[in-house]
Image (cartoon, rainbow, N blue to C red):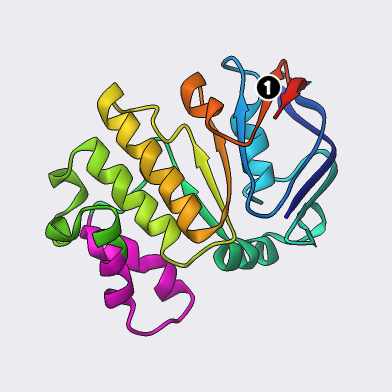
Amino acid sequence: MLKLKDIHKSYLSGGHPLEVLGGISTSVEAGESLAIVGPSGSGKTTLLGICAGLDTPSSGSVHLMEEPLSELSEDHRARIRNQHVGFVFQNFQLIPTLTALENVCIPLELKGQRNVHKKAMSWLERVGLAQRSDHYPVQLSGGEQQRVAIARASVSEPAVLFADEPTGNLDEETSGQIEELLFSTHRETGNTLILVTHDTELAAHMDRVLRLRNGMVEMAQA
């Protein structure tokens, strides 16, 4: 499903290269769940973006669904993301001028599918928000917005779901509900789940944990 080999990522800072990732290698099997953890500044979100094809490494190779992401154009990577990837962000990233239902429809419309409202509504029902389908993001709580975001990320049945601190902006009770929703979706769809989190309890429920420190793998555990 996903293979990383010797991933390095550097940025220019004050005219000098700043290495964010220093040689990450790992692989994730289809249907597996992986948590990427570590202190702030350890490179977690950068690594997740490279895994998802949102960013490219300075060196090293990334293969997602057997496609060499690091060698492809942005347009080609975008097509792979549209076809195979779902993404859940910490700050939800719903389009404010669209209703919950319209937000969930977006991935299906990008694929040119028909009967998108029916399928989108079925996912809003699965996340417990069918009765809020005509509400705009500003009319929803943080937990409700994240439920919509999970429905949007899952509606096109992606092979792999990436989540960047999906409970980071939520209170403890709501975080627990979102975690259970992520895991139930993972079980029902059989997708591959890869997430970044500071939540040690959430990480403990994943199949494997990859711990980063200073841009390098400090520990990998099952």
Residue 163: give x, y in percent of width and height: 50, 41
Element type where label 1 sits in the image? strand
Q: Residue at x 43, y 44 (%)?
A: 182
Q: In the image, is 190 to the left or to the right of 145?
A: right
Q: In the image, is 15 to the left or to the right of 116?
A: right
Neighbor class of circle 1 (other Cα within 10 Å; few <14, some 14-19, many 20+) is some
Quadrant in which the N terminus appears: bottom right
Residue 216: give x, y in percent of width and height: 77, 21
Q: In the image, is 165 to the left or to the right of 24?
A: left
The kind of residue on which mark 1 rests is Arg
Q: In the image, is 7 to the left or to the right of 77?
A: right
Location of residue 123 by image quarter: bottom left
Residue 108 magenta: yes
93, above or below 39, in the image = below
144, above or below 42, in the image = below
Residue 152: give x, y in percent of width and height: 38, 58
| Magenta extent | 97-122
Q: Residue at x 33, y 31 (%)?
A: 176
Location of residue 72 by image quarter: bottom right
Q: Residue at x 64, y 47 (%)?
A: 32
40, above or below 121, in the image = above
Count how many numbered circles sit on residues in the image. Answer: 1
Q: Residue at x 54, y 27 (%)?
A: 203
Q: Which residue is mark 1?
A: 211
